[in-house]
Each structure stands twice: as C-alpha cells, then as structure tokens.
Amino acid sequence: GAVVSQHPSWVICKSGTSVKIECRSLDFQATTMFWYRQFPKQSLMLMATSNEGSKATYEQGVEKDKFLINHASLTLSTLTVTSAHPEDSSFYICSARGAWAYEQYFGPGTRLTVT
Amino acid sequence: GQNIDQPTEMTATEGAIVQINCTYQTSGFNGLFWYQQHAGEAPTFLSYNVLDGLEEKGRFSSFLSRSKGYSYLLLKELQMKDSASYLCAVILTGGGNKLTFGTGTQLKVEL
C-alpha cells in the first residue's frame, strides 16, 4: 500500500514554455503533498507544502508565480513550471502523507530538462 | 535556520558493517527518518525514530539521541546493492510536519 505515482517520468521542453507534473496517491487519501527539487549529487530541497483545497505554502526563495501548485483532490497535486528556463532543469519529486502518520511516501520523480 | 549534517561520502567492504552519522540542530523536533535513494530514483523509507534508543529492522538499525541531536544508521552484512545515497530527515513541529533533509551520504560498497 501507500503508492505514489508521478507523470511524466521525464520531460524535455523548450525555454519559455510551461510544464505540468502530476503527483497521485494511488491507494490512500493524501491530506498533504510536498514538492521537492533535487540537483545532481545534492539532497532534496523542499519547495512547497500543499493541503487539499487550500493554497500551497512555499519555502523561502521559491517563486510561487513560477511554480504553480494545485491540490484539487485528496489524490492529486500538480506542479506547473511556468516560463521554464535551463536553470529549472532538475529532478522534481513529490511526496504524500496521510492523516494517520508522519511518514511521507515518495513518487518516482520527474526529470525535467529545459533546452 | 535548520542544520542537518551528514558525511558526504563513505566507502565500505561487502559483508562489513557501516555506521552513517547524522547530527541536527533544528527548531522543533517530531522525529527523524532515514531514507535510501539510488541514483535517479525516489527515496525509499528505511526507519523512523522519535524516542531515544535503537530501532532494529533486519540488516538496518537506527539510533536516536534527542539530547545530543544525533542519530546514526547502521548497516550490517553489506551488499553491493546497498551502494546508494542515505538521507536523514527531521520532522519539524508545526507547518504541516514537513521534512528537512540532511546533506545525504553517498555510500559505496566495494568487493
């Protein structure tokens, strides 16, 4: 149980375009979802926390107008990278947490490359 | 700010035991996780400690001392497949119980 999926697993886009990444909890209701970014050989950096039906809480230094997060249901959150630039190229990972525990279940990640 | 430190790299021999340390200084504490992450993949859960002491789970054990702000992950009978990055993460109080990750330790298991 507690499976989280992400789509797409990788995406290449041109500079200036927008990319949407989906995160789904497949077999549980995720009261909270988290979005992380990870650069090569570095640890995970939390970008934002989202609760179903409310606005996301962004970490300091993360532009909320650039990284749009929507948590429309208890099983789906989306991250849209708007007007992508090459420096946005990274590994984006979501995680989901149910109401019963602190543990976060991670999705398989999305590799974004902006050319 | 939050500060979670781990050694950057470690190397160990197949069949041996290795201990990966994690020290933390955070505003609030609701527990500490250890995750394993292979290159290009998402982290997978290894252990969760909220009380002081040792938690054993097969070849993996995790220890916590809250008064010292210190944890370690102990891997026994190392296998080649244990070569990965090991991340410790602290749950902070408040703010949706978000995780703050340490710098990560890249473990290389050699023959």
Image: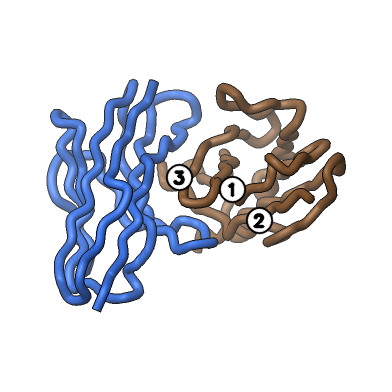
Chain colours: A brown, B blue
How crowded pointer 3 is (Cα within 10 Å; few <14, some 14-19, many 20+) is rated as many
Splitting the image into 4 quarters, where does residue B61 fall? bottom left
Q: For this view, does A39 lie left or right of residue A42?
A: right
The residue that label 2 is drawn on is: A111
Image depth: mark 2 or mark 1 in front: 2
Which of labels 1 and 3 is toward the front?
3
**How far from the left and from the top, in percent, is residue A67?**
72, 34
Q: Chain of mark 2?
A: A
Amino acid under disc 1: Cys
Spatial CA distance of label 1 from label 3 is 14 Å
- Give the quadrant of the C terminus of chain B: bottom left
Q: Return the x and y of residue A60 as percentages of the image width and height.
A: 56, 22
Asked if disc 2 and disc 1 are in contact, CB closer than 8 Å, the reply is no
Q: Secondary structure at mark 3?
A: loop
Residue for badge 1 = A94
Q: Same chain for the residues at labels 1 and 3, yes or no? A: yes
Location of residue B79 by image quarter: bottom left
Q: Are marks 2 and 1 on the same chain?
A: yes
The residue under label 3 is A43
Q: CA distance from mark 2 to mark 3?
A: 15 Å
Q: Which quarter shows the N terminus of chain B?
A: top left
**C-alpha span from label 2 to label 1:** 12 Å
What amino acid does circle 3 point to?
Answer: Ser
Sequence-wise, the earlier of marks 1 and 3 is: 3
Q: Nearer the viewer, residue A29 or B44?
A: B44
> Mark 2 or mark 3, which has the lower sequence index?
3
Question: Residue A11 location in percent, x, y?
Answer: 75, 57
